[in-house]
């Protein structure tokens, strides 16, 4: 809690004085802010073996310097202090408690070292003990303003057989800048501070009674009625709270108690704040990472336990390694980004569309979205890789299975993106299939193939791209809705690449949401076909291509999501549940 | 809700009558009885009956208002003027209403016919107030004195002292104070303002005199006795002396006594940018808001004045130029005093309400202040003095009446019992049912009332302005893999709350009002309609979309808890009792928590021992202080010697010993254990606080003997014996012993300390001690079974050694269960300590511990002697373990958590705070000494560990989420985030002023740009948005019509269709959330688009991005929560 708790005393010789004061020091940055997910952080919180390190600004106010600069410290001069005005002996460094879990430090001194805080506390102390009026003199008050902070103060008496009226006046104050927080905490603070006061008073009462028993002051004072203040001038006038309570560890105890109070008050209310579910892409990515980890652990420990589908997994690992650099299973993948930037690569979907031409691109994209096998035949591995990197952005991550470059044809169930070297033979039924598309990258016959577009792209000029498929998409075919939207976005040069990216994210999530409903409907609840048809039209996906697309994308749903849907208790048939 | 006239006793001006009484509109649930208490009681009953079958059950309120008496809200206005001293300008207690009949008569005498009729119409014994409809006659009525101002109450001087303080403050801004007055119980909230006094001329001055006239003229008291009020007033005015108001200023610096001048550094701080936390997408806006709040209210680097609140009390027309020289010389205090009910429960209820809802109270107080200002200024124009007073008094009384009614409304308004979002969040059990119910209502509305797009418009508006739903759909980037894809509690916000505590109540309020966008807008929603049921359905459904966080209340305790399955927690005794409900028919459970001691005993480093008698030197750390530990026995030096050995060896010793102990437990006799522990306890029990030292040697000798004779087989027995005595001393010192409580209490404490000596883990004490009675019995029984002389005091023995002869007793089993918590904890502490010295043996020991624990718990069930032995073994080992050197560092403590995590309890034990007790108990190795002295050179503070903490969490019901979502109310209430009303009459009357007020005195304690109210009228089928920024369009319309977003309507349609297709409710809701997430993603796209554009090409948005122009306001608002720049472009 952003507060200062202080014990104040109205000294009969010196007036209101701050005796003891506990401050809270938070780490300069919020926890978790320094963790990896926040790249924008100026610098991570310095976590050290001994706990947190305060930033230099805070440190400069830390007691280390404050105490050394004792003479210049804003506190009252020694000569102005008597026993009663003092808590810790001169030169005492104060107390500190670390709360490791929260990186919060609680420090106690007689006065805050920060000059501004010193006056804040001083002002609050003065107001608490000599300005504000509390009926009965003992009790809680709240007061304050924006400039001096807000104060919850509780005044009380401590028995003292030697004091005038046999008691001394104290207050415990809590200072905050957040007045609403402070006022909200009133009932809590009142309870706790009252408790502390009760115990202090109890201790003092015992001492008082013991002293009275030994040497009844009242009688003595009666006898010395004509020199009423004599004993006060004798040095008894100001007794420390330690002696009044006969508790030599009082200050340590108060430090612990105040720190505890601050901690308890700060955590009195907590929020449960929900955040959104992760997107399907995030989930799938996490799953793949987890699989990968498991696998690599398995490899570490035991003999290579061969899984039949290991190859695609590895491939996925490679893909992941790009999105999450820490798993650098395939370093060449990373270096590729840097080193070959200027080489012949596709930089974006829009770029690819420009290179291939609108109709070829449309055909290619159509096959990609439908989950048909996309085969690139090229000499240049990097080119193929970049093509796949660009094309895959159209699909949910879960739908992407890439074999970036292979010396033999791989079946469609293993990969929907396949890179092949030019000499590899592709089975004829594949070439004739409507479920595959082939992109052949050849050396350009005429270097002036795309003369105007690519002045800066010398590298791609040397290639010619031939897109073929067993059943070319009819030009008048409407195609899946998402394809049309993607094309529209790519066409519009007003939209920056970032906008297009966001647009793709939106479209994908939108369609994944439809996929989810379809999955629930058909796979989990096994609803009849007529219903499914209705559902598809509700989803605005009744057209053939859209249905195909949804079915393919369903394979990309995360395991987490699917198992959740499967495992949730099937709700009773709706007719029962709804009346 | 009962519309109404709260009890307006014939006495002191309880005038709260308002225009609504003139309206003939049938009020829902209207109850005719005028007695407040009875009415509320009845309405409670009625409410529960009438709403039982309804879709929307309305909770009457979270706060029982039955004890709350409107007339007990008192207003005092005070003036503190240099020249004239303090004067009461108003005290509602001194105002008495003149009998209506008299007024009537006078009115007739004045032959104001219309007025007379209306007066009669305005019912009962209330005085009517300002209302446009009757304003014409108001003027007439103002001519007639309705109030009589008697002498201010006797306590008014004291109250003045409290308001102003005994010493003048020079601060120019307003000062806020809250006092609690014990008897009679009252809560006083006061604000002191500097007065802005205009430069007056001529007759204006008379205001001042009028006030004085109020205060001083005793003849005024006779006014009412004299039936001819007018006449008296006239004569009274003659008595009033007229004096010039203000003397020239005496200079400006006169009273700068206690102010702190703003230093230059301060303004530089203002410029210093805060380290901006994560801008990562997930829940960034919520997070950001909270982080900023915690930073701007931080005290660490000095204070940062957040906004200049040079709030003044204006005593002159704005047309009058204020005279700065005069400003600071006059202060006005406005104070509101709530009389608290005598009954403790009711009093606590109101206090809870007051303190948790303080921002709202303050806001209304500001409104009241404004009305008082107005009253003062306007009455000034009246030349005739007595009339001036009358106008002034009645105006202020009107404002006070309004304040009273508002507070009462706020307190007692019907609330939505089951806000959907909050309930879905908190209760997992009935989630499916909740979903079904919600969806049923939701689809009903889509089907029935969306023909004209009404519902879509309403939902568009709600989603556009109550923006707190956005963070709840922002996808998280890094979910833990195992977690399901549903929403989770935001971890980053949780972390923030721990490391930088902020005020969750405040955060919740901002969420509810949707004040998380940029620019900040504060939004409320009102549903208007005569069809109560329909309105209630709408309200219910909207509680799903108007979102906020759920609050949890945590009670932090530092002492250990007792066992499970019982109600003794952490030294706090929780008693539950079933009590007959007073108001409701049903019973309710009263839970009382008796708190642990408020003074937390510190865990001191042992070096303090040396300087025991010198309190000021406790921090001095000298080598000899360790030596000076007041134990002179041989073992001591041996121990120290051992301590200085390498930690490995001792660890080995301990580990093996420990294992051995566990294994050998069977062989060992329990009595043995008992005695060892017991002796030290007994001796310490006998000791006086001051005598600890003296008897120590004796004690130790005894222990030594014990060890040598009985347990010589133990490798480190001396140490355990020595340790306990040493410990005992340390804990004694701390001083909790000098407790002021009764003998019983002291006794209890002594026992605790004794226990402490043994376990060295002070936290264990409380749980153990809390089961005193039971254990005493048991231990008594034990005395027969065991040779050891058990006394009731040796609770610790009971916990561990009681079991052996217990084959028969069920009660003992129970008891054992009770103490299980403690034992487990002991084990944990051992394990953590074991783990401390070196890391490499961690795992081994952990498994040891685990084995041990499973052994224990397994055996618990049949209470076999194995179990006991295991425990005794643990116990016996513990002192030894404790005696182990424990380095200051905390490395390895994490491990101890893990062990502790196994305890089936809702606890968060923060190792860092706890576990460190050993620091106080153990001899510090040289290395550490070295560190300390090194640190001392640097003036580092003495480190004191905080005790380990446990948290008991419970749902916090009394928060804004539960109180500001209103039901169908009898009248328009400005504070509620959501509520329904019968007609918009009141709304039209007050809305604009309320919006302005909300903007100028934001309850959020931070500047807001705009206050907005969404008004959905189910009678006229329109949805409008009224704002503080635009003037009302015309007489008919309250605000601007809402554009229906096609995103929203398509969302509604598909949910409806899915529902009709019998897709399960919970899945429909998942889909709904997915669709909301889509909107968020679209807003991301929009913000990305806008980044590069200064102009929006709507066509582009439509074709390419699927964003239609009617979606733009919604998406832009969503975008403003994550990309503030969007607002600058679009708005």
Image: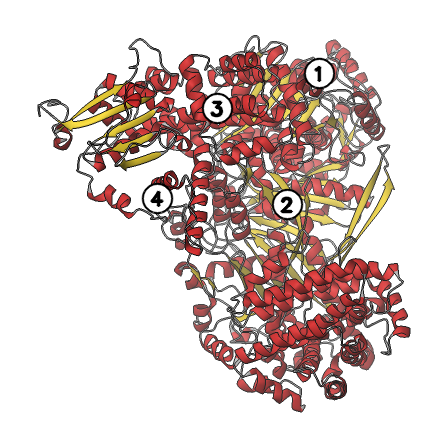
**From the viewer's perspective, is B215 left or right of A362?**
right
Question: SS at mark 4?
Answer: helix
Going from N to C along the chain, the mark reached first, 2 or 4, is: 2
The Cα–Cα distance between marks 2 and 4, rounded to whole angstroms, is: 50 Å
Residue A6 appears at what percent x and percent y? 60, 61
Q: Alpha carbon of mark 1 to alpha carbon of mark 4: how far? A: 59 Å
Task: Please state if B395 lies on the left or on the right of A290 as rendered.
Answer: right
Residue B256, given in percent of the width and then of the height, sits at 51, 54
Instruction: Give me the chain letter of mark 1.
Output: B
Say the numbered circle drawn on residue A321.
Answer: 4
Q: Residues within 10 Å of mark 4 (few under 14, many from 20)?
A: some
Q: CA distance from mark 3 to mark 2?
A: 47 Å
Residue A133 in view, yes or no: no
The image's mark for residue B532 is 1
Asked if the residue under mark 2 is in contact with the one under mark 3, i.e. CB atoms within 8 Å, the reply is no
Foreground label between 1 and 3: 3
State the CA–CA distance, disc 2 to disc 1. Answer: 35 Å
Residue behind mark 3? A515
Task: State the image coordinates of residue A257 (x, y, percent, origin top left).
Answer: 64, 63
Residue denoted by label 2: A184
The image shows residue B1091, relative to residue B101, as above or below, that is below
């Amino acid at each position: 809690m952003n507060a200062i708790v202080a014990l104040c005393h109205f000294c009969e010789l010196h007036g209101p004085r701050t005796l003891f004061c506990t401050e809270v020091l938070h780490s300069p940055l919020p926890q978790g802010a320094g963790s990896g997910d926040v790249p924008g952080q100026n610098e991570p919180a310095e976590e050290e073996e001994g706990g947190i390190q305060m930033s230099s600004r805070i440190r400069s106010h830390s007691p280390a310097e404050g105490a050394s600069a004792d003479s210049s410290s804003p506190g009252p001069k020694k000569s102005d202090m008597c026993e009663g005005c003092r808590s810790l002996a001169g030169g005492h460094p104060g107390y500190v408690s670390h709360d490791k879990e929260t990186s919060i430090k609680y420090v106690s001194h007689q006065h805050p070292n920060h000059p501004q805080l010193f006056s804040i506390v001083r002002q609050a102390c003065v107001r608490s003990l000599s300005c504000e009026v509390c009926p009965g003199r003992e009790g809680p008050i709240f007061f304050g303003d924006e400039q001096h902070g807000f104060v919850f103060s509780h005044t009380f008496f401590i028995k003292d057989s030697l004091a005038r009226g046999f008691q001394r006046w104290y207050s415990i104050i809590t200072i905050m800048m957040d007045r609403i927080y402070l006022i909200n905490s009133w009932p809590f603070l009142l309870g706790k501070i009252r408790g502390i006061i009760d115990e202090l008073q109890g201790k003092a009462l015992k001492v008082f009674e013991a002293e009275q028993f030994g040497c009844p002051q009242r009688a003595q004072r009666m006898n010395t009625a004509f020199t009423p203040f004599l004993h006060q001038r004798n040095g008894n006038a100001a007794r420390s709270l330690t002696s009044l309570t006969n508790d030599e560890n009082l200050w340590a105890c108060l430090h612990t108690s105040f720190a505890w109070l601050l901690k308890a008050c700060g955590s009195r209310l907590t929020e449960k704040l929900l955040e959104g579910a992760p997107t399907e892409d995030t989930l799938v990515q996490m799953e793949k990472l987890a699989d990968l980890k498991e696998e690599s652990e398995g490899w570490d420990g035991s003999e290579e336990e061969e899984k039949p589908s290991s190859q695609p997994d590895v491939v996925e690992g490679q893909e992941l390694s790009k999105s999450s650099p820490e798993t650098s299973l395939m370093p060449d993948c990373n270096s590729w980004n840097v080193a070959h930037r200027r080489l012949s690569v596709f930089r974006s979907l829009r770029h690819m569309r420009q290179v291939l031409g609108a109709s070829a691109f449309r055909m290619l994209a159509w096959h990609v979205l439908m989950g048909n096998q996309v085969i690139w035949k090229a000499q240049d591995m990097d080119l193929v890789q970049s093509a796949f990197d660009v094309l895959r952005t159209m699909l949910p991550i879960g739908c992407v299975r890439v074999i970036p470059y292979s010396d033999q044809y791989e079946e469609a169930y293993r990969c929907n993106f396949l890179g092949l070297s030019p000499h590899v033979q592709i089975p004829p039924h594949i070439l004739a299939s409507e479920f595959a598309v082939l992109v052949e990258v050849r050396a350009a016959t005429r270097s002036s193939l795309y003369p105007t577009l690519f002045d800066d792209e010398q590298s791609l000029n040397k290639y010619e791209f031939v897109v073929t498929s067993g059943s070319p998409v009819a030009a008048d075919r409407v195609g899946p809705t998402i394809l049309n939207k993607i094309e529209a976005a790519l066409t519009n040069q007003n939209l920056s690449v970032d906008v297009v990216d966001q647009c793709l994210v939106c479209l994908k999530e939108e369609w994944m949401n439809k996929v989810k409903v379809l999955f629930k409907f058909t796979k989990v609840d096994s609803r009849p076909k007529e219903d499914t048809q209705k559902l598809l039209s509700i989803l605005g996906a009744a057209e053939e291509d859209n249905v195909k697309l949804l079915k393919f994308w369903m394979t990309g749903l995360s395991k987490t999501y699917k198992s959740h849907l499967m495992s949730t208790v099937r709700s009773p048939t709706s007719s029962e549940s709804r009346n | 809700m009962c519309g109404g006239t709260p009890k307006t006793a014939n006495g002191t001006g309880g005038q709260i009558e308002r225009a609504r009484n003139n309206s003939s509109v049938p009020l829902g649930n209207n109850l005719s009885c005028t007695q407040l208490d009875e009415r509320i009681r009845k309405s409670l009953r009625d409410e529960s009956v009438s709403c039982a079958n309804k879709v929307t059950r309305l909770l009457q309120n979270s706060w029982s208002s039955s004890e709350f008496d409107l007339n007990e809200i008192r207003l005092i206005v005070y003036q503190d003027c240099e020249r004239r001293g303090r004067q009461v300008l108003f005290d509602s207690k001194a105002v008495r209403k003149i009998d209506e009949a008299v007024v009537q008569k006078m009115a007739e005498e004045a032959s104001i016919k219309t007025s007379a009729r209306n007066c009669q119409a305005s019912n009962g014994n209330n005085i009517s107030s300002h209302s446009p409809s009757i304003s014409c006659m108001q003027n007439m009525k103002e001519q007639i004195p309705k109030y009589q101002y008697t002498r201010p109450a006797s306590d008014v001087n004291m109250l003045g002292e409290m308001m102003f303080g005994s010493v003048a403050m020079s601060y120019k801004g307003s000062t806020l104070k809250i006092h609690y007055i014990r008897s009679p119980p009252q809560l006083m909230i006061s604000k002191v303002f500097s007065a802005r006094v205009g430069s007056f001329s001529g007759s204006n001055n008379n205001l001042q005199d009028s006030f004085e006239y109020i205060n001083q003229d005793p003849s005024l008291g006779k006014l009412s006795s004299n039936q001819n009020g007018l006449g008296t007033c006239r004569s009274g005015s003659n008595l009033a002396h007229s004096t010039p108001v203000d003397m020239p200023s005496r200079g400006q610096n006169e009273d700068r006594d206690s102010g702190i001048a703003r230093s230059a550094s301060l303004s530089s701080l203002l410029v210093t940018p805060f380290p901006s936390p994560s801008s990562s997408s997930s829940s960034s806006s919520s997070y950001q808001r909270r982080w900023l709040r915690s930073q701007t209210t931080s005290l660490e680097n000095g204070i940062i004045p957040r906004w200049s609140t040079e709030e003044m009390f204006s005593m002159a027309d704005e047309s009058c130029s204020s005279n700065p020289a005069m400003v600071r010389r006059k202060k006005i205090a406005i104070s509101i005093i709530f009389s608290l009910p005598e009954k403790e429960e009711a009093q606590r209820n109101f206090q809870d309400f007051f303190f948790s809802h303080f921002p709202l109270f303050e806001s209304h107080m500001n409104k009241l202040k404004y009305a008082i200002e107005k009253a003062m200024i306007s009455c000034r124009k009246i030349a005739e003095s007595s009339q001036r007073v009358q106008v002034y008094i009645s105006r202020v009384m009107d404002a006070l009446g309004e304040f009273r009614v508002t507070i009462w409304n706020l307190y007692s308004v019907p609330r939505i019992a089951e806000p959907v979002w909050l309930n879905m969040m908190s209760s997992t059990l009935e989630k499916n049912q909740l979903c079904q119910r919600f969806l049923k209502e939701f689809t009903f509305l889509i089907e029935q009332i969306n023909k004209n797009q009404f519902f879509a418009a309403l939902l568009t508006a709600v989603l556009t302005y109550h923006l707190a739903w956005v963070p709840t759909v922002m996808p998280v980037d890094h979910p833990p893999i195992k977690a399901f894809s549903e929403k989770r509690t935001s971890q980053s916000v949780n972390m923030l709350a721990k490391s930088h505590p902020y005020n969750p109540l405040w955060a919740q309020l901002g969420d509810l009002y949707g004040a998380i966008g940029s620019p900040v807008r504060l939004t409320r929603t009102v549903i208007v309609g005569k069809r109560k049921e329909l309105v209630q359905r709408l309200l219910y459904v909207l509680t799903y979309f108007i979102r906020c966080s759920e609050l949890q209340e945590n009670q932090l305790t530092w002492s250990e808890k007792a066992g499970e399955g019982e109600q003794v927690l952490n030294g706090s005794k929780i008693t539950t009792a079933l009590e007959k409900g007073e108001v409701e028919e049903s019973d309710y459970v009263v839970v009382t928590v008796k708190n642990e001691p408020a003074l937390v005993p510190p865990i001191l480093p042992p070096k303090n021992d040396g300087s025991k008698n010198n309190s000021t030197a406790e921090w001095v750390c000298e080598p000899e202080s360790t030596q000076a530990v007041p134990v002179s026995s041989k073992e001591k030096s041996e121990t120290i010697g051992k301590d200085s050995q390498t930690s490995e060896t001792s660890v080995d010793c301990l580990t093996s010993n420990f294992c051995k102990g566990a294994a050998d437990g069977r062989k060992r006799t329990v009595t043995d254990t008992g005695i060892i522990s017991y002796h030290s306890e007994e001796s310490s029990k006998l000791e006086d606080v001051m005598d600890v030292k003296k008897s120590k040697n004796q004690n130790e000798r005894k222990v030594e003997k014990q060890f040598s004779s009985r347990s010589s087989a133990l490798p480190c027995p001396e140490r355990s014996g020595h340790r306990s005595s040493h410990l005992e001393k340390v804990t004694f010192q701390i001083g909790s012993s000098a407790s002021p409580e009764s003998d019983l209490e002291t006794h209890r404490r002594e026992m605790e300390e004794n226990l402490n000596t043994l376990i060295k883990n002070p936290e264990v004490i409380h749980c153990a001690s809390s089961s005193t009675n039971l254990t005493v019995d048991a231990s008594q029984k034990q005395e027969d079974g065991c040779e050891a002389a058990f006394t009731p005091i040796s609770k610790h023995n009971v916990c561990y050694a009681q079991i052996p002869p217990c084959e028969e007793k069920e009660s003992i089993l129970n008891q054992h269960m009770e103490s299980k918590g403690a034992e487990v904890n002991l084990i944990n502490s051992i394990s953590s300590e074991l783990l401390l010295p070196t890391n490499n043996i961690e795992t081994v020991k952990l498994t040891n511990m685990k084995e041990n624990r499973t052994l224990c718990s397994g055996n618990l069930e049949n209470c076999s002697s194995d179990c006991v032995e295991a425990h005794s073994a643990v116990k016996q080992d513990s002192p030894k373990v404790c005696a182990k050197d424990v380095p200051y560092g905390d490395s390895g403590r994490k491990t101890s958590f893990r062990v502790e995590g196994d305890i089936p309890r809702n606890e968060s034990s923060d190792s860092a705070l706890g576990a460190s007790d050993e620091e106080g108990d153990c001899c510090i190795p040289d290395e550490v000494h070295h560190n300390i002295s090194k640190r001392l050179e640097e003036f580092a503070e003495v480190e004191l560990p905080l005790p380990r903490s446990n948290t008991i969490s419970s749902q916090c019901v009394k928060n804004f989420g539960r109180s500001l979502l209103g039901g169908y109310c009898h009248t328009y209430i400005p504070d509620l985030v959501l509520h329904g009303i019968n007609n918009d009459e009141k709304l039209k009357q007050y809305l604009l002023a309320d919006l302005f007020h909300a903007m100028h005195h934001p309850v959020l304690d931070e500047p807001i740009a705009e206050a907005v109210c969404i008004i959905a009228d189910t009678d006229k089928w329109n949805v409008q948005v009224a704002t503080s920024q635009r003037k009302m369009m015309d007489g008919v319309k309250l605000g601007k019509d809402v554009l229906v977003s096609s995103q929203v309507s398509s969302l509604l349609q598909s949910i409806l269709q899915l529902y009709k297709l019998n897709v399960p409710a919970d899945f429909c809701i998942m889909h709904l959330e997915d669709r909301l997430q889509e909107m968020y993603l679209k807003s991301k796209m929009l913000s990305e688009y806008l980044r590069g554009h200064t102009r929006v090409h709507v066509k582009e948005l439509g074709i390419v991005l699927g964003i239609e122009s009617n979606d733009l306001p919604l998406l832009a608002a969503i975008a403003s929560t994550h990309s503030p720049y969007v607002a600058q472009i679009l708005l």
